[in-house]
Image (tube, rainbow, N blue to C red):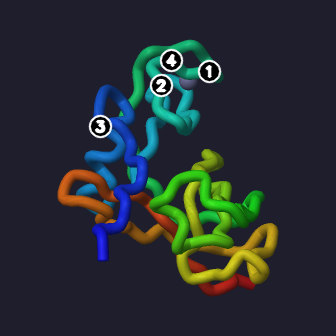
Amino acid sequence: MADAPTPPLPTLAGLAGEFYGWCKKHELRFQRCTACGTWRHVPRELCAACGSWDWEWARSSGRGRVFTWTVAVRAMHPAFQHAVPYAPVVVEMEEGVRILSRVTDCPPDALEVGMPVAVAFDDVTQEVTLPTFRRAPREE
Ligand SMILES: [Zn+2]
């Protein structure tokens, strides 16, 4: 049997490379403006809230909730052929930023808006670790 095709992976350059560098250490960090405290993602140089260039990589709690998703029933890349149907999920983190990922222990038809999730890490290659999510206990 032929090797499975390699999935498309992020380019590890610039600010995105720094983001994935933290993921490789199994730490989920987002940029936080050190002038006004606003969190942001995806990585960029300038704070959209106050215009400051000053920021830090601040550690996320890793907790969030399902914000929205779609279900892919046709693989858009051969590497995902085995995974269909799967759900790309937008998670809203406690810090307020949203991240596109997957909830790996939840089939698409069991997803719910507001479902609590917690970050996990998928070491896809020796260089690339992707942040993924798992279901988390509901807090009353
Ligand atoms: Zn700011």
For badge 2, the amino acid type reads Arg
Mark 4 or 3, nearer chain start: 3
109 on left or right of 21? right
Q: Is mark 1 within 8 Å of ligand 1?
A: yes
Q: In which quarter of the image is residue 114?
A: bottom right
Q: How many labels does the image show?
A: 4
The location of residue 18, given as percent across then percent down, is 30, 37
Query: For the residue marked with disc 1, what is the amino acid?
Result: Ala
Residue at (47%, 36%) from the top-left corner? 32
**Residue ID for mark 4:** 46
Looking at the rendered structure, the secondary structure element under dot 2 is: loop
Label 3, label 2: how many angstroms apart (C-alpha)?
Answer: 14 Å
Above or below for 99 versus 68: above
Judging by the rendered image, the residue that carries numbered circle 3 is: 12
Q: Which residue shows up at 39% across the image and 58% down it?
A: 130
Residue 35, position as x, y percentages in the image: 49, 23
